[in-house]
Amino acid sequence: GCLQITILEADGLVGTDYSMQTLWTGELTTDPYVKLSMGSVSWRSSTVEADTSPEWEEDNVCLFSVDIPDEQQLNLSVFDDGFTQRLRRKAQIAESSADEIARFEKPIKITELLGKSVGELTQEQEVEEWFSLASWWAGKGFEPEILDAGKGMNGSGDGAESTQEGEEGSPMQRFFQSKLDWVKDKMQERATMWNDQKTNELQAAEARIRLRLQWKPLGNALDTENADGAAVKKTAMAFWDRLREATLKDRAAAEREER
């Protein structure tokens, strides 16, 4: 069948950047967009500017073809699309996992997403519901620039040579080296504290997203007796073209690896 997903709104997203609107208040905001994927097919929504409770009104509808609804799974992630991320995209650099701000806790099967059994999917279904999002997950972490700043003073490279010279040098050199070590320790301590605070904030976040899910069995979806059916068929044909193109690319990549 065909599953049409409309991204409506989200709330409780954790901000990652300052904007002109929030610069004076000190609040963090984000420029979120939603990415959906099922198998090798993915789609992304439009970006909502500077909003931790965004509402999508355009470029927010996608269509997936589903063959085995009790096995196929949907992945949903929310990414930040700030200035740095847009520059990266213009340079055709892939999305960074560091830009992901929320996601489904785990991929969700289509039957679970709709809250219906396979037998019920022989009929058209429509569901509008809030889904919880995780803002923290294993492997997600932060390394502020302040951590990098201390690496030049660490026991490697030029920093190691400075430490060795300081230990064997004059009292003045040893004095300055001790001050540098103190600064490095304070910087790392501050970075660790920032990291812990951010982790606690993300773990306590209660982000969620509201979706409208419309399911049509394949026969009904391709019924062109009405305008809606014709539109769905046109979208479905475009989907199959994208799927075929993605499959050909996957095969070409596999052949290159074999060589």
Image (cartoon, helix red, strand yellow):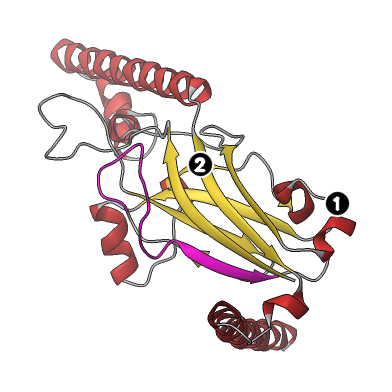
Q: Name the residue under label 1.
A: 117
Q: Which residue is drawn at 41% across and 35% down?
A: 13
- Whole-percent x, y for residue 214 in the image: 63, 60
- Amino acid, disc 2: Ile
Magenta stretch: dominant secondary structure: loop
Note whether 240 is above or below 10 in the view shown: below
Q: Which residue is drawn at 38% across and 16% down?
A: 193
Viewer-side residue, 161 vs 85: 85
- Whole-percent x, y for residue 73 in the image: 73, 56
Q: Is mark 1 on a helix, strand or loop?
A: loop
- Whole-percent x, y for residue 259 in the image: 72, 89
Labels 1 & 2 near each other (Cβ < 8 A): no
Q: Name the residue under label 2.
A: 209
Residue 46 is left or right of residue 234, and the answer is left
Q: Disc 1 versus disc 2: distance between alpha carbons?
A: 23 Å
* Range shown magenta: 48-65
Note whether 148 is above or below 219 in the view shown: above
- Whole-percent x, y for residue 38 in the image: 66, 64
Viewer-side residue, 55 vs 107: 55
